[in-house]
Image (tube, rainbow, N blue to C red):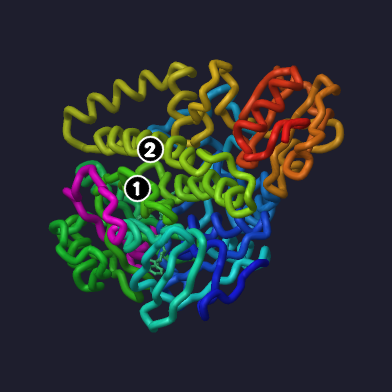
Amino acid sequence: MSRRERKGLLMYDLIIIGGGPTGMMLASELRLHDVSVLVLERDAEPTRLVRSLGLHARSIEILDMRGLLGRFLEHGTAYPGVGRFAGIDKSQPEHLDTAHGYILGIPQPVTDRLLTERAAELGAEIRRGAEVAAFSQDEDGVTVELADGTSLRSRWMVGCDGGRSFVRRTLGIGFPGDPATTEWLLGEMDVTTPADEVAAISDEVRKTQRGFGIGPTPDGHFRAVVPAAAVSDYRSAAPDFEEFRARLRAVAGTDFGTHSPISLTRFTDATRLADQYRVGRVFLAGDAAHVHPPLGGQGLNLGMQDAFNLGWKLAADIRGWAAPDLLDTYFTERHPVAADVLTITRAQSVLIDPAPGPQAVRRLFAELMDFDDVNRFLAERIASIGIRYDLGSDHSLVGRRLRDLPSTTGRLYERMRAGRWLLLDQTGRLSIDGWSERVDRITDVGEELDAPAVLLRPDGHIAWVGEEQNALDAALHRWTADSLPGVE
Ligand SMILES: Cc1cc2nc3c(=O)[nH]c(=O)nc-3n(C[C@H](O)[C@H](O)[C@H](O)COP(=O)(O)OP(=O)(O)OC[C@H]3O[C@@H](n4cnc5c(N)ncnc54)[C@H](O)[C@@H]3O)c2cc1C
């Protein structure tokens, strides 16, 4: 790792602000390329608050590509189905384009812990209780000031510091969208009311109250969500437990004998998207770049996938082989994806509204989903497996990610552990001479790939499809600063 002193300041290649799932995923991706990474996390201890309850197919795929899926499966539960649109109950669509057609139920504190362990194992330096209070940038790098007065320096910085991002606000990046109109209180606690009675009351209240719910957690407590009386002025402050119980009584007619709160928080339906993801040497990723209500359970997934897109690009720049426009492709690829998540979240918000109009649309939607193509279209949107980045090619595969493929010598995703480029060469005659420092090649591709040769980026998206050597060389030259073979 190339951490060093410069003008009396510790100098890193990359400082990440925020040790949530986005920050930790990003740290691991950079460490695969031996880049020095420091993660600064404000909270001294990990939170026990359970926000996300699970992972969708694309996140499961990226865990698989990096050899992490085993440990997630050990701590989670695989539920059949790839994500229900607005909670509309339909069977799994046929011919889903993934080897992981399930939702992985896993509480966010466990996801956060596993991603943190992985980043630490790979050598990322993680400082807890380290709140960033200021930063400034110049041509060569970024100087970061902690609240305790410590100064640090890095070549690049990424704000993965959540929806109220200090980094985004300091950069003055616009965050247009819809302000909060509804606030909910979320908490984990114990109850004295018997579980079947809790379930019956919850079912009844849900018929008229959007977003209400209370039910048991896998570890024997109860998780409750209840609409707040109004959108509060101090949304970063956790609700008082008495306020929480009062809202349960007001909405459900009972507080279920709730006691012993484990965690309490508030969230809203604010829906916003940053209008830039980068200013100079500072990027945004995850909730810092986009916020939306948790319908469909996509926020954490989106953040992990932002990190997966940005990681190898930043590493390429730091290691000196990025094409001049490579870092800009982070915004051009990921901003439309986040915009789409906001669209489908807004649509689902309408479909769960108990008012008669939205409920009529919901019934119609449910009927449309009986068409398998519609069902699959929506499932792939939620699971983020239908994404196609615009890489300037007309070929229908270019820009898409490739599902895992079996072959006689092992699965495709098992060959992607190191985060390198990969050429799947069914022609058996293409060469990676001149590129082998960053590109691997396999000829045993299996029978499912319907193309002579495919070039996969480190994030598993297809950069090129073809069979001619000079076209392959041109594609690699387009993505890297490396010269064409034989050209100085
Ligand atoms: C009720 C609820 C349910 C949800 N359910 C789902 C779901 O089922 N599926 C899903 O995918 N998503 C879900 N989400 C969304 C998910 O929780 C977030 O999208 C995810 O946590 C974002 O990760 P992040 O790393 O970008 O930000 P965060 O997890 O918010 O992490 C940001 C980190 O930055 C730190 N930080 C902030 N400021 C500073 C600073 N100045 N200096 C240093 N550190 C700082 C914070 O302490 C925090 O640890 C849900 C959210 C809510 C509220």
Q: Is residue 260 left or right of residue 82?
A: left
- Residue at 39% across, 62% down: 137
Residue 50 versus residue 177 in the image, above or below: below
Q: Quadrant of the N terminus?
A: bottom right
Instruction: Please tell me how crowded label 2 is: few (under 14), some (14-19), or many (20+) other residues with Cα within 10 Å.
Output: many
Q: Is residue 241 left or right of residue 44?
A: left
Any atom of ligand 1 within 8 Å of the CB at mark 1? no
Any atom of ligand 1 within 8 Å of the CB at mark 2? no
Amino acid type of the residue that numbered disc 1 sits on in the rendered structure:
His
- Give the numbered dot on residue 409: none
Q: Which residue is mark 2?
A: 341
Residue 173 horizontal/vertical position (percent)? 29, 51
> Is disc 2 in contact with disc 1, using a CB cutoff of under 8 Å?
yes
> Which callout, 2 or 1, points at the residue further toward the start of the chain?
1
Q: Which residue is mark 1?
A: 290
- Residue at 58% across, 39% down: 323
Q: Is residue 437 visible?
A: yes
- Residue at 39% across, 83% down: 148
Q: Is residue 417 left or right of residue 374?
A: right
Residue 189 horizontal/vertical position (percent)? 36, 69
Amino acid type of the residue that numbered disc 2 sits on in the rendered structure:
Val
Residue 460 horizontal/vertical position (percent)? 63, 37
Q: Ligand 1 is located in which of the four quadrants?
A: bottom left
Q: Is residue 197 visible?
A: no
The answer to which quarter of the image holds residue 423 is: top right
Most foreground residue, 318 or 332: 318
Q: Quadrant of the C terminus?
A: top right
User: Hey, which residue is sitting farthest bottom in the picture?
Assistant: 148
The answer to which quarter of the image holds residue 414 is: top right
> Which stretch appears magenta?
169-195
Q: Give the CA separation, mark 2 to mark 1.
A: 9 Å
Most foreground residue, 23 or 136: 136
